[in-house]
């Protein structure tokens, strides 16, 4: 099997799986909506929802196709300007949403916040805190400690009050920064690999996507960790491109990538999926016959792995400092 064939399979299979799940969600949205019978009296809710969803989807596809076609006539510098404007509009909308909605947090996010606040007492993360929550969910140690340090910094900067009355709102704004840092990283990645046109369409999609806004009040590992995965990939690709040109900068990028991936992994283990994807791309790109290229990639990835391993050891030591119990008998592993 040729390298081109392997690349085609690796890129095609995820797209196919994504399409199947998207269709499944669309169909479930049509026929499985609790309260739909009460929302519509005389018209069947299944028929009405199906019609509205298909109409909306058709309009969205038409609008995107039309926009994609006319962007061919837009110069690259103006396309970059429009991307900046779209990003600023998205950021402004996020701020308006967070400050207007004033949404509280619940479930795991609230437990993480409560424990981060309790760390100011100096007692550490206790086995019986919050009905033994942290003796079960060991995957939330890192986000709790990071949240504690974030609140401590914001208090010193006089952004958060000493009584933490605006602590949740401040973290929701921080969540905007984490989310947008991930979006910005993906824009840079797409612009570098695919071109300005694709990067512009991504930011437009992010700007009109409701999830870009409604997830912001929920400060938790899913939003915080995204930026670490994206920027870890960017630094890894940068180190590969610098190999043979600037050895010092190449090593620095590899080391930083390892540190970022390690912290991202501690926050949410799914960041490791991004690292695996980056490894696959690196292994499939370039020539297999060029010994120099293979050597460069091997050394770069080795440096990253060493950096990541050392960082995980350090982060584990930090966790141990804040844990007031032995976490070996937790109900779920760290990758839960």
Image (cartoon, rainbow, N blue to C red):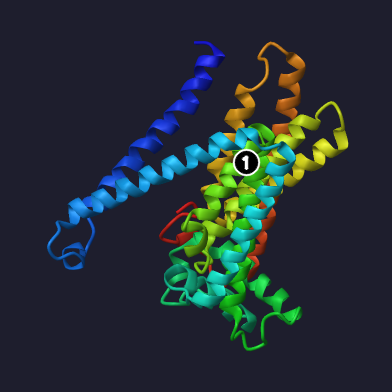
Question: Total of numbered circles in the picture?
Answer: 1
Residue 323 shows up from this direction: no
The C terminus sits in image quarter: bottom left
Instruction: Give whichever of 65, 23 is nearer the camera.
Output: 65
Which of 89 and 194 lies nearest the eye of the viewer? 89
Q: Which corner quadrant of the image does residue 309 belong to?
A: top right
Quarter-of-image position of residue 325: bottom right
Residue 211, image x and y in percent?
Answer: 47, 57
Q: Nearer the viewer, residue 298 or 24?
A: 24
Residue 143: where, in percent of width, then height?
A: 58, 64
The residue labelled by disc 1 is: 199
- Residue 84's spot in the image, x, y percent? 69, 52
- Which element is circle 1 on? helix
Query: Is 206 placed above or below 142 here?
Result: above
Is 145 rendered above or below residue 6?
Answer: below
Query: Which quadrant would residue 146 be assigned to in this image?
Result: bottom right
- At which x and y percent is residue 26? 30, 46
Residue lying at 42% horizontally and 57% vertically, measured from the top left: 332
- Residue 331 shows up from this direction: yes
């Amino acid at each position: 099997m040729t390298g081109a064939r392997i690349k085609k399979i690796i890129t095609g299979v995820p797209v196919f799986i994504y399409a199947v799940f998207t269709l499944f969600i669309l169909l479930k949205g049509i026929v499985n909506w609790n309260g739909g019978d009460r929302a519509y009296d005389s018209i069947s809710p299944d028929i009405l929802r199906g019609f509205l969803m298909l109409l909306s989807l058709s309009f969205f596809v038409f609008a995107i196709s039309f926009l994609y076609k006319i962007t061919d006539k837009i110069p690259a510098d103006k396309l970059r300007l429009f991307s900046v404007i779209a990003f600023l509009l998205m950021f402004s909308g996020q701020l308006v949403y967070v400050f207007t909605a004033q949404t509280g947090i619940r479930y795991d996010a609230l437990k993480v916040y409560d424990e981060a606040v309790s760390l100011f007492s100096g007692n550490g993360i206790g086995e019986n805190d919050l009905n033994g929550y942290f003796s079960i969910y060991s995957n939330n140690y890192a986000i709790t400690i990071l949240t504690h340090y974030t609140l401590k910094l914001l208090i010193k900067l006089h952004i958060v009050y000493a009584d933490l009355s605006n602590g949740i709102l401040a973290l929701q704004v921080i969540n905007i920064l984490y989310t947008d840092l991930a979006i910005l990283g993906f824009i840079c990645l797409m612009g570098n690999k695919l071109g300005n046109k694709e990067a512009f369409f991504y930011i437009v999609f992010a700007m009109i996507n409701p999830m870009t806004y409604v997830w912001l009040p929920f400060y938790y590992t899913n939003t915080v960790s995204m930026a670490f995965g994206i920027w870890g990939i960017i630094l890894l690709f940068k180190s590969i491109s610098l190999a043979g040109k600037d050895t010092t900068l190449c090593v620095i990028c590899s080391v930083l990538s390892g540190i970022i991936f390690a912290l991202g992994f501690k926050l949410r283990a799914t960041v490791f999926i991004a690292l695996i994807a980056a490894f696959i791309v690196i292994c499939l790109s370039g020539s297999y016959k060029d010994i120099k290229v293979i050597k460069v990639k091997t050394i770069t990835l080795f440096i990253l792995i060493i950096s990541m391993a050392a960082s995980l050891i350090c982060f584990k030591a930090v966790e141990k400092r804040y844990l007031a119990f032995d976490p070996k008998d937790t109900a779920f592993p760290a990758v839960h």
